Image: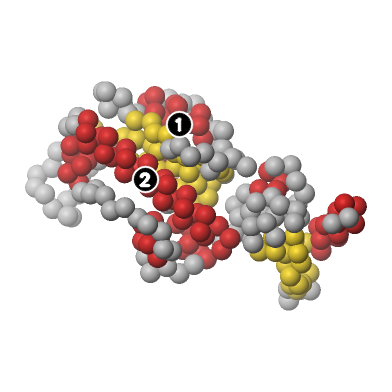
Amino acid sequence: MKRLFFDIETSPCLGWFWRPSYRTRLSYDNVIEDAKIICVSYKWHDSDKVETLKWDKKQSDKKLIHDFIKVMNQADEIIGHNGDRFDIPWVRTRALFHGIKSVPRWRTLDTLKSVRSNLKFPSNRLGDIAKYLGLEVQKMDTSFNLWKQVMAGDKDALAYMVEYCEYDVLVLERVYEKIVKFVPAKTHAGVQDGGPKWSCPHCGSTRLVRNGTDVTRAGTESQKMKCKSCGGNYRITTKQYAKFLEYKIKNNC
C-alpha cells in the first residue's frame, strides 16, 4: 500500500492595523496579501528520500499546489499530524484559489486525531510524542523571525525552513510506526493490496492467530485476531473467520 507522509509550512497574512495587540481584530479588508503555502515536504513509506516542493521566486504557490496534488493522487493513504484540520484544508483551499476545478477526497490518517481518541500522552504535539516514545528529536529554532526572513526573500532562511519541514516528516513517520498497532487502521492494507477481508488491516499479512471471541450485548459475535507478522490486533466477523479457516485448510497452513 502506498502511504504518503507530509507536512506543510505556510506564510502569515500581510495587512494594515492600528496597533499591535494579541486581541487585535482585523477585517479581511485590512489584508493586503493572503497567506500561502511556502513549502510542502513528503515521503513515501517505502522510500528513504524526503522530497520538497517550494513556492517560486515570486513567492507564488501555484505550481507547488499543482505538482503536489499529482503526488497526493498516487497515494492510497495520506498521513499528517493535524492533517485533517490544517494541512489538507490548506491544500484544497489553495487549489480552489488557483482555479483547479476539483480535487479528490483523499483517504487520510491524522495522527493527532488518532492519539487523542485512543491514547493519553502528556502532550499531543508531534515532537513531544516522539520524545515520550523515546525517539531522538533534534531541536530546531523556529521563531517567527524565521518566517519574516523567508518572507523577505532570504534564501538561507528558506533552506532552513525546508530542512525543518523535512525533519518533521521524518519524525511523523517514526511516530506513526510506533503508534500504528495501537490505533484503528484507516485503510485496510490487505484489501487495498488485493487480499481477503480477514487479512491483517495493518500490514496485509495472512499469517494470523485467533485470540478469542467478542460478543456484543445484542449477541453479535466477532473473532479477535492477532497478526503474526506485525503483531497487530483486530476483529473480523464470524463469516470472515470461516473463510480464513477455509484458506488454512486449502493451503495446509
SS at circle 1: helix
Q: Is residue 133 above or below residue 79?
A: below
Q: Which of disc 2 and disc 1 is earlier in sequence?
A: 1
Name the amino acid, label 2: Tyr
Discs 1, 2 touching: Cβ within 8 Å: no
Q: Is residue 205 above or below residue 120?
A: above
Mark 2 surroundings: few (<14), some (14-19) or many (≥20) residues within 10 A: some
Residue at horizontal 36%, vertical 45%? 167
Color encoding of the figure: secondary structure
The image quarter in which residue 133 lies: bottom left
Where residue 167 is drawn, which disc sits there? Answer: 2
Mark 1 surroundings: few (<14), some (14-19) or many (≥20) residues within 10 A: some
Residue 180 is situated, as x and y percent measured from the top left of the image, at 55, 57
Whether residue 121 is visible here, answered yes or no, is: yes
Q: Is residue 117 above or below residue 87?
A: below
Of 168 and 39, nearer the camera is: 168
Of 107 and 5, nearer the camera is: 5
- Residue extending furthest left? 19
Where residue 68 is drawn, which disc sits there? Answer: 1
- Asked if residue 40 lies left or right of residue 11, the reply is right
Where residue 89 is drawn, which disc sits there? Answer: none
Residue at horizontal 87%, vertical 52%? 251
The image quarter in which residue 125 lies: bottom left
